[in-house]
Each structure stands twice: as C-alpha cells, then as structure tokens.
Amino acid sequence: MAIYHFDASVFSRSKGRSSTAASAYRAAERVVDRRTGEVHDYTRKHGVEHTEILAPAHAPDWARDRSALWNAVEQIERRKDAQVSREVRVALPSELSVEQNRDLVRGFVQEQFVARGM
C-alpha cells in the first residue's frame, strides 16, 4: 500500500535559509553563493539518484544551470525577510520503477510549475 506524503515549505532569508545552499545539498553538488561568498560543497554526499532542472521553453540557457539559477534568485531578492524559494517534497510509490517515478515527478513539475512560467 502506498504511503501518502506531500509537503511544501518556504525558504526565508530571515530564518537563515539559502536557496544556493539547499540546491547544492539536494543535488550533492558544489555551489558558490555569490551574495555571501559561501561555498556549499556537498559533492561527497551519497544517495542522490537523479537531479534535473526543468524550465519553460522560453527560459534562457543559464536557467538550466543550478549555480546560475539559484544565484540569480538570491540576487533578485534583496529584502532581509525575502522568501527566496519553495521546496515540495512528495513520497513516491514503491510499486513503481525508478523511471516511472521520474516520469511521474516530471509530469507534476511540468503541469504545476513549468507550464505556469516557473
């Protein structure tokens, strides 16, 4: 039986959250925060099976680069209480294959975010 879990949260600068740090951690990559100069290096982190950035067709090429994208988000939000990003976490059905779950997430992201210009 599938377990249902869906959670959405906001990354707020006033709470010390950083979208560059979160993106580096989630993707197990290295991202330098150009606003603060901090280096977020999670390249030794294990367990990340797949990462992908989906963007609208009209989005510039740099929007598909993790470091460029999240640094642009951090730069455009100037307020100390800015809500710099949101995170959506879902439980995926164990009855489906990895590829089927990937397709399921892609479809959800395409419909709920990319189709709306995000």
Image (cartoon, rainbow, N blue to C red):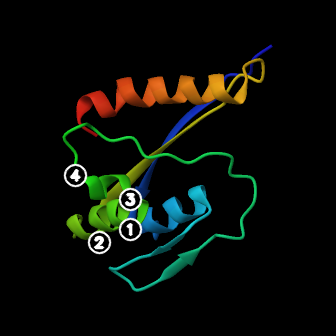
Q: In the shown orientation, is residue 107 left or right of residue 61?
A: right
The CA distance from mark 2 to mark 1 is 6 Å
Residue underneath mark 1: 14
Residue depicted at x 40% and y 86%:
37
Dot 2, how many residues are within 10 Å of its Cα: few (below 14), some (14-19), or many (20+)? few
In the image, is residue 58 above or below residue 24? Answer: above
The CA distance from mark 4 to mark 3 is 10 Å
The CA distance from mark 3 to mark 1 is 26 Å
Q: Examine the rendering and report whether any part of residue 94 can be seen.
A: yes
In the image, is residue 114 above or below residue 2? Answer: below
Q: Earlier in the sequence, mark 3 or mark 2?
A: 3
Dot 1, how many residues are within 10 Å of its Cα: few (below 14), some (14-19), or many (20+)? few
Dot 3, how many residues are within 10 Å of its Cα: few (below 14), some (14-19), or many (20+)? few
Question: Badges 4 and 1: C-beta atoms under 8 Å apart?
Answer: no
Amino acid type at mark 4: Pro
Q: Earlier in the sequence, mark 3 or mark 1?
A: 1
Helix, strand or loop at mark 3: loop
Dot 4, how many residues are within 10 Å of its Cα: few (below 14), some (14-19), or many (20+)? few
Q: Tell me residue 24's x, y (percent).
A: 53, 64
Q: Earlier in the sequence, mark 4 or mark 3?
A: 4
The CA distance from mark 3 to mark 2 is 25 Å
Q: Earlier in the sequence, mark 2 or mark 4?
A: 4
Question: Badges 2 and 1: C-beta atoms under 8 Å apart?
Answer: yes
Residue depicted at x 34% and y 33%:
113
Helix, strand or loop at mark 2: loop
Residue underneath mark 2: 80
For residue 60, the mark is 4
Q: Examine the rendering and report whether any part of residue 81 can be seen.
A: no
Question: Badges 3 and 1: C-beta atoms under 8 Å apart?
Answer: no
Residue 18 is drawn in which quadrant? bottom left
